[in-house]
Image (tube, rainbow, N blue to C red):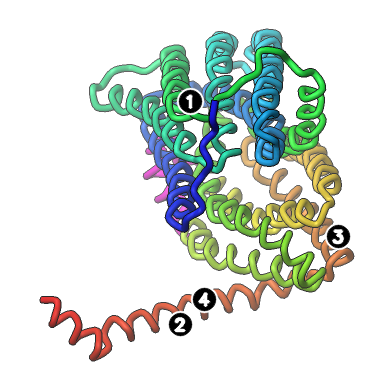
Amino acid sequence: MTTPNPASSTNYWLRSGMYTLLERVVTLVFGFGSLLLLLRLISQSTFGVWVGFLTLTSILEVGRSGLLQNALIKYLANAHPSETPVINTASLVLNFGITLVGAVVLAAVGPWLSNSWDSPGLDRLFLIYIFTTFALIPLFQCNFIQQAHLEFKGLFWSTFVRQGLLFGFILYCYLAGKSLDLISLAWVQFIATVCGAATTFMIARPFLDFAKKIDWKWVKTLLHYGKFVFGTNLSTMLYKSIDKMMLLSMVSTAGAGLYEVAIRVTNLAEAPTFSIASILFPQSARRIQSEGKEGIRKLYEQSVGAILAILLPFILFVLIFPDWIVGIVGGAEYNGAGALLQLTMLYGLFIPFAVQFGTILDSIGLPKINFYFTMAGMGLNIVFNYLFIKQFGTVGAAYGTLTTYCITFIGMQWLLHKQLGVRALQVIPGIFQFYGKMFHLGRNYLQMKWSPEAQASQTLDK
């Protein structure tokens, strides 16, 4: 089978970038839209059960993606055409193997978590998700193969179909006034995943070339490369999810549901952070070659300053009007989340520093240090969440996580200063520089828009 070569024109790159951006927008819109409707269709305690279900399944999906994606993309992008089928087959075997392990884990821990988290029916949701996780095998495989060939259309459309069908079902229940149970929702999630997998398979067919025999050396090679990304991704997800898991164990599903509402609003602040991080990685890799550590230092300080400049207005707005925002998102049942939201919103002040810390370390060849910091942060988060939740209940999860962010922030800045000479306070001028640049861009645009030449041109056009 002949694998098409991606176009090298500017239009091609613009189209690829558009698909990537649209995929993120679709995930955000459908995900947040589903949240708004679910909070009005099910009780707080039932929503807490769904939070527990999504927390564990998301950890499994992100870890699995980390094990497969980077390794497949790296080796396919540089492989001789004759090796492509062998690598694809090896990756598919690895995909099936990690899926099987995940399914066994879900079946084994489901009943225990259902009792431990006081979440009736959670074990049944996990059993249904076993079907979903096997449906993710072709979805992940096709998407990752396309990405290796610089094609992102399948990623967008599979996400649109998968997320859109689930959102459509929830919207139908809301508009029709029908009751919604989590078992039905889990089955619809499975059906949506199958449809998403079929969609990306149709788009990826020109790239799907598999060997009939398994080359176990390639399986080991992909596993060896992906295990570090798997460990970091898994640790990061556990780091970010441990507060919700401990609330389910130590408080109640209702408490976890209340906390999740605050976290979902806070997560909106992560969008610009991760978008800029994806741009920063290749830039930092280039600058370490051309400008050395001084270039990396400036890039870190400027990028964090730019992200904070974007986030600060949103953070301040949420801090001033938390109850109003919670009322819009969750309704009257979640009024108690206003104070929680104020605390969790403060996470947004630390997340840009943490994300760019990991990006910089990866780009300069120190991924193990990033992994160790993530593991240390996860350990601290467990300790502080346990102590604060035991003392203060649901709000203790926010205190514990915020304390962890503060301590890891100090450690990260110390290391960056030692390695690259980074000065955290230099981020502040970067914030004002960003606002200055935006002001000048806006002023220049208006001057061009309303200049006599522009006015004359508009008159001629008419």
* Residue beneath disc 1: 205
Given the current orientation, which residue lies at the most extreme left position? 462
* Residue beneath disc 4: 435
Query: Could you tell me the amino acid type at mark 1?
Result: Arg
Looking at the image, residue 403 lies above or below residue 287:
above
In the image: residue 246, left or right of residue 260: right
Query: How many neighbours does mark 1 have within 10 angstroms: few (below 14), some (14-19), or many (20 or more)?
Result: few
Q: CA distance from mark 3 to mark 1?
A: 46 Å
Q: CA distance from mark 2 to mark 3?
A: 35 Å
Q: Main secondary structure of the magenta part?
A: helix
Query: Could you tell me the amino acid type at mark 3?
Result: Leu
Q: Is residue 333 magenta?
A: yes
Q: CA distance from mark 1 to mark 2?
A: 48 Å
Quarter residue 224 falls in: top right
Question: Mark 2 or 3, which is nearer the eye?
Answer: 2
Question: Mark 4 or 1, which is nearer the eye?
Answer: 1
Looking at the image, residue 400 lies above or below residue 124:
below
Looking at the image, residue 193 lies above or below residue 20:
above
* Residue beneath disc 2: 440
Asked whether the beta carbons under mark 2 and mark 3 sit within 8 Å of each other, the answer is no
Q: Going from the N terminus, do you reach mark 4 or mark 1 first?
A: 1
